[in-house]
Image: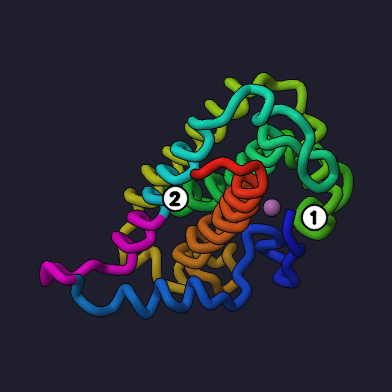
């Protein structure tokens, strides 16, 4: 969910100006308290790693009913939200994998089989992902999302800091850096993590 982005190349895992990202970038420059300088690549990957753990902790405390009953906008369950995140994550993985292999992205078949422009018609893409993978069990959806997240971390690790930050390195990113792609997936996940945290609080869970 979330507002479709105006930037054509990244409709959902967006690149819009965001205070959290600016803070992360600013925070990245100085050395940390131990005096060890953390570069931008390490900083992004550390943030993603922490976010993965936050998700796993939150999800691990929920019952099957909490995970699979419709209780969010559009009658989405937490499983549907995770499928939604997985779908966009696959798009991000295609881009980062293309960078690692130094070729153009090869997007998933299910995405390319969508009628119309998947990166233009975000609502349709969102609906297609959620409807298309709704039949999966929670275990399958969780496993797919987990594997995608861990693969993204591995791929991010495989890109050099220089290539990650260079806005002209990959012509098919139309002037965006790969770092911006990783930050966009972080922000998208963060948006839904906050949605889940708020929902949990409304349930009276201390999580
Ligand atoms: Ni979303």
Q: Which residue is mark 1?
A: 122
At x 38%, y 57%, the residue is: 47
Asked whether residue 36 is drawn in magenta, I would say yes
Q: CA distance from mark 1 to mark 2?
A: 24 Å
Q: Earlier in the sequence, mark 1 or mark 2?
A: 2
Q: Is residue 51 above or below residue 44?
A: above
Q: Which residues are magenta?
A: 33-47
Relative vertical location of residue 38 with respect to residue 204 in this rendering, above or below: below
Residue visible at 48% across and 72% down in the picture:
21
Give residue 128's quadrant in the image.
top right
Q: On the picture, is 73 further left or further right than 56?
A: right
Q: Nearer the viewer, mark 1 or mark 2?
A: 2
Question: Is 98 on the left-hand or right-hand side of 33?
Answer: right
Residue 171 locus on image (x, y percent): 55, 67
Disc 1: CA contacts within 10 A as few (<14), some (14-19) or many (>=20): some
Q: Residue furthest front?
A: 204
Query: Within the image, what quadrant is residue 161 found in?
Result: bottom left
Residue 101 falls left or right of residue 46: right
Q: Residue furthest left?
A: 35
Q: How many marks?
A: 2
Check mark 2 vs ligand 1: CB closer than 8 Å? yes or no. no
Q: Secondary structure at mark 1?
A: helix
At 70% from the left edge and 27% from the top edge, which residue is drawn? 68
Mark yes or no: residue 130 visible: yes
Q: Which residue is mark 2?
A: 51
Query: Residue 95 shows which numbered tag?
Result: none
Q: Residues within 10 Å of mark 2 (few under 14, many from 20)?
A: some
Residue 158, given in percent of the width and then of the height, sits at: 33, 49
Instruction: Give residue 140's position: percent from left, percent from top.
Output: 60, 22
Residue 149 screen position, x and y as percent: 48, 41
Task: Looking at the picture, tell me which residue is in the foreground, 172 or 33.
Answer: 33
């Amino acid at each position: 969910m979330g507002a479709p982005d105006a930037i054509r190349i990244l409709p959902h895992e967006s690149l819009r100006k965001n205070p959290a990202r600016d803070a992360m970038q600013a925070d990245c420059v100085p050395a940390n308290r131990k005096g060890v300088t953390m570069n931008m690549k390490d900083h992004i990957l550390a943030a993603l790693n922490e976010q993965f753990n936050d998700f796993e902790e939150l999800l691990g405390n929920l019952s099957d009913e909490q995970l699979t009953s419709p209780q969010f906008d559009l009658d989405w369950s937490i499983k549907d939200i995770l499928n939604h995140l997985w779908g966009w994550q696959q798009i991000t993985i295609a881009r980062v994998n293309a960078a690692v292999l130094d070729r153009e992205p090869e997007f998933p078949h299910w995405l390319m089989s969508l009628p119309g422009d998947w990166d233009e018609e975000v609502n349709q893409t969102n609906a297609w992902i959620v409807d298309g993978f709704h039949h999966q069990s929670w275990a399958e959806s969780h496993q797919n999302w987990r594997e995608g997240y861990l693969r993204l971390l591995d791929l991010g690790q495989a890109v050099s800091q220089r290539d990650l930050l260079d806005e002209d390195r990959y012509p098919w990113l139309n002037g965006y850096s790969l770092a911006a792609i990783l930050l966009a997936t972080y922000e998208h996940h963060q948006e839904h993590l906050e949605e889940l945290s708020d929902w949990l609080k409304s349930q009276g869970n201390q999580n």
